[in-house]
Image: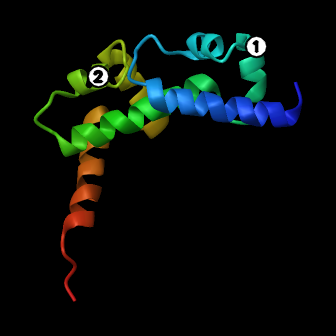
Amino acid sequence: MRATDFVALRERCLALIDHHYRDHRVGPAWLARELFVSRRQLDRAFVGCPSVAELLAKRRLRQVVAIAAFRPDIPMSIVARRCGYGTYETFRAQCHRYLQCSPRDARNTHAETLRALTLPTAA
């Protein structure tokens, strides 16, 4: 496969991730099947870039943290499941891995950022 084909494959894969990340069955193997390529070919398209699994995890993680910050009344375990995590433990582990903090700290940090963006500035 030519390099330009890998660029197109990456773009199609990213579009699928954005569209289907909420489904807990979506993973690298599922994405490869949907793109009609082997898992190995999909991995080759992402050489030098974050892996497919990492991109999917970060997409889900961003969404969980954003929703949890916006809606602190909903338990994060429910938000995590709705955003594609099979278990809360997976979400927690990825939060520590990619954000280097606990889910609660990630939510609180994001909530503080939201508050800072919505508060009127004193002139």
With 17 as the anchor, is 104 left or right in this view? Answer: left
| Residue 119 x/y as whole percent | 18, 69
- Could you tell me the amino acid type at mark 1? Arg
Q: In the rendered image, which quarter is residue 8 located in?
A: top right
The residue drawn where x is 57% and y is 22% is 53
Residue 50 in view = no
Helix, strand or loop at label 1? It is helix
Q: CA distance from mark 2 to mark 1?
A: 29 Å
The residue located at (53%, 15%) in the rendering is 27
Q: Quadrant of residue 70?
A: top left
Judged left or right of residue 83, residue 100 is right
Q: Which image quarter: residue 50?
A: top right
Name the residue tied to disc 2.
82
Q: Is residue 123 above or below residue 60?
A: below
Front residue of 61/104: it is 61
Closer to us: 63 or 122: 63
Screen quadrant of the C terminus: bottom left
* Residue in the image at 32% along x and 33% along y: 64
- Image quadrant where one finds the N terminus: top right
**Tag 2: Cα neighbours inside 10 Å, few (<14), some, or many (≥20)?**
some
Can you say whether 89 is above or below 59 in the image? Answer: above
Percent x, y for residue 24? Answer: 40, 14
User: Judging from the image, what secondary structure is the residue with disc 2 in?
Assistant: helix
Q: Which residue is mark 1?
A: 40
Q: How is the image coloured?
A: rainbow
